[in-house]
Image: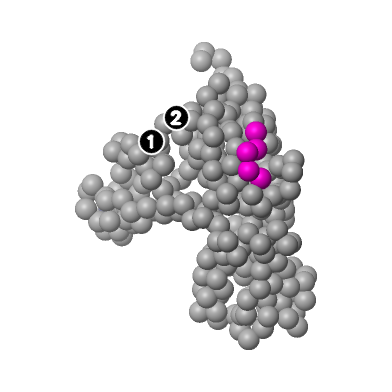
Amino acid sequence: MPSAVIVCPSGLAGEIRTAKIGDLEQFAETARRNFARALTDLLNSCWLRTDDKAIYPEPLHWGKVLAGDRLYSWIQMWILRSGRKLEFQFQCDDQGCRQVNPKLQQWESMLDALVVQMLPEASKTTFMAGNRFETTVDGKRVAFRLLTGELEAEVEGRSRGRKRTLSEGMAERLIEVEGVGTKFEALTKWAHDLDDGEVERFIAVRDAADCGVELGIEVQCEFCNRVVPIDIPFAENWTRLVRKKGSTSPGR
Ligand SMILES: [Zn+2]
């Protein structure tokens, strides 16, 4: 079974293998209820060995791991299985064009050419001390946290498939706001009244403290030549793969 030694954006290092059919079946089953939890289970079963635990407690549990490390490792699993290429269609965002470009074929080295943001040294210390980061928003002291697998699963459980508003999305990452407290409803209400510029500044501070893999790329529409910014549909492609494997329809 193919495996590889990888080093995640936080410095977490170890060996990961490709998924077995049983892993994919389990993933499909759990993802129906909670996608983040399905990914946690998948990474837990495919992680063979930890060489450097970096910022995490041992034994390693992928629910406690940062979203950036999880995405990075997940992409490495894909590369192990299917190579560096990811084929997908995209629709041109020009109002007069709107053509669907066929599957991209020319991105042979795309998945390992994505920009990886390493976790800053200062963030490692703060994360290990309890994942409580501090900044100021709209004149108030604000404590926030970086996204882990457990937090993602919790957020997903709360929103139950409903698309979250911008203020809910912001509140989910907050621990406490001076004078507002720690309750999700109160934090959402506070975020709702912030001006757009304050939110953008907060997101910039938050993202600079985090690690991750940049899924945004620019592709050119072959019908009108417009350069279109898109996010690589990595999770969607994975889900398609799992569905294909999980299919037991007769005649296949
Ligand atoms: Zn176009």
Mark 2 crowdedness (10 Å alpha carbons): few <14, some 14-19, many ≥20: few
- The front one of 189 and 81 is 81
Say if the magenta span includes residue 52: yes
What residue does disc 1 label?
85
Q: Are marks 2 and 1 in contact (CB under 8 Å)?
A: yes
The correct choice, above or below, for 195 with respect to 218 in the image is below
In the image, is 87 to the left or to the right of 163? left
Q: CA distance from mark 2 to mark 1?
A: 7 Å
Q: Residue at x 37, y 53 (%)?
A: 217
Say if the magenta span includes residue 61: no
The correct choice, above or below, for 203 with respect to 36 in the image is below
- Residue 135: % across, % down: 63, 76
Q: Residue at x 70, y 46 (%)?
A: 63
The answer to whether mark 2 is within 8 Å of ligand 1 is: no
In the image, is 11 to the left or to the right of 185? left
The correct choice, above or below, for 103 with respect to 99 in the image is above
Label of residue 82 in the image = 2
Residue 52 is drawn in which quadrant?
A: top right
Residue 211 is drawn in which quadrant?
A: bottom right
Q: Secondary structure at mark 2?
A: helix
Q: Hey, what amino acid is under mark 2?
A: Ser
Magenta-tinted stretch:
49-53
